Amino acid sequence: MALAAGAFLVTACEEDGPISVVTNDGPEETGEERGWISLGVATPDGPVHVLHAWNDEIVVGGRFDAAGGSPAANVAIFDGEVFRSLGDGVDGPVFAAAVYAGDLVVGGSFATAGSAPAPNVARWDGSAWHAMDAGLDSTVTAFAVFAGELYAAGVFTGDTVSALPRLARFDGVSWSPVTTQAPDGPGLAMSVYDGRLILGGSFDSTGAFPAYHLACWDGSTLCDPGPEFRASDDVLALRAEGSGLYVAGRFTYVGSRSAMRVARWTGAGWSSLGAGLGGPVRALEFLGGAPVAGGAFTRSGNTSIARVARFRGGAWEGLDVGVDGQVDALLVHDGDLYVGGHFAHAGGRLSSHIARWRD
């Protein structure tokens, strides 16, 4: 199951009227194009931090004012050809997205959604924005759906009435704390693996025991997979695939094993993926059965790779010449890989902040 934040990610996570529709000015697809396919200039006018599938379309979240040449406040829908705004959007950056009870949920660092107060988390039902209980008191960085509830991670702490220290769950009506022994720093990514919720981030302890950048929750208690289940630095992305949990971030070791920014947990131990990657990895996806990583790296060992890489045949390889700025989000949709981030070009072609790769 894929992690619901976005992949982690994570990074930086706004009167509802009719949805506006604009066409994309990018080059027309021939149906035979392969490699990087430019989406042109009519793309979000600022960084894209999260990509998520919803109702057979793509949710695009980030820090932007327009998409497709029309106003779209920090969140939009893309159907492969057209960007659409979601009402008046939200008034601050979006860092996470999930689908819960059929609706789209976005999290980030904002105060309102549409015209309604919605501190840092809001729900879109297809026609209007809604608050979710009283919201959360600071930035939301990741979501996951686990055991029928929506879990949120971030830097929020709650208040004196209902403390929500960096990890909370929503049952469809209200937010509640997951545990009184929450991580001592923000969670930045979540995924469901082997029947447990896995949290990655920038923390060293859960209060119950040491938890170096990785922790797990079995639905009732914090679980301890053992001293090897740890990373040497921040975990920024998680992806459960097959029998493995793929972990990525800023680390150079997992447990006692050297692993440059990306590794695979089997349930019993770690395996590294080739030479790893030479800079932070902020997003993970799978394309054609192979892991794909996006981030701020420019090398794997002695091989130049510009911020998007695929692991095949025991080694990381670039997707052509890659992109010219940091990648924050990856999503495979209808067989194509969508990439979001801080770049202006993909494969040397103009494609601001979002691009498409086709094998």
Image (cartoon, rainbow, N blue to C red):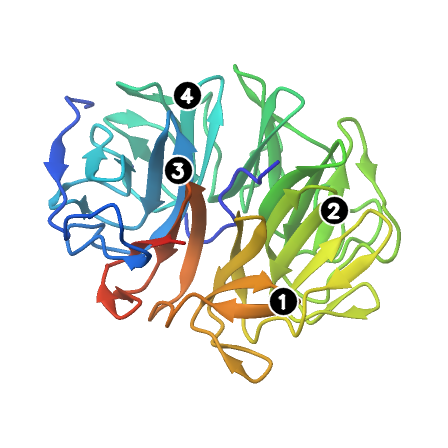
Q: Secondary structure at mark 1?
A: loop
Q: Which residue is disc 4 drawn over?
A: 103
Which residue is at 44% across, 44% downward? 332
Q: Which residue is disc 3 drawn over?
A: 334
Q: Is residue 199 visible?
A: yes
C-alpha span from label 4 to label 3: 21 Å
C-alpha span from label 1 to label 2: 18 Å
Circles 1 and 2, Cβ within 8 Å, touching? The answer is: no
Going by the numbered disc 2, the residue's amino acid type is Ala
Image quadrant holding the N terminus, namely top right
Q: Which residue is disc 2 drawn over?
A: 215
List the single residue furthest toward the bottom: 302
List the single residue furthest toward the front: 32
The answer to which of marks 1 and 2 sits earlier in the sequence is 2
The answer to which of marks 1 and 3 sits earlier in the sequence is 1
Disc 1 versus disc 2: nearer the observer = 1
Answer with the quarter of the image where residue 334 lies: top left
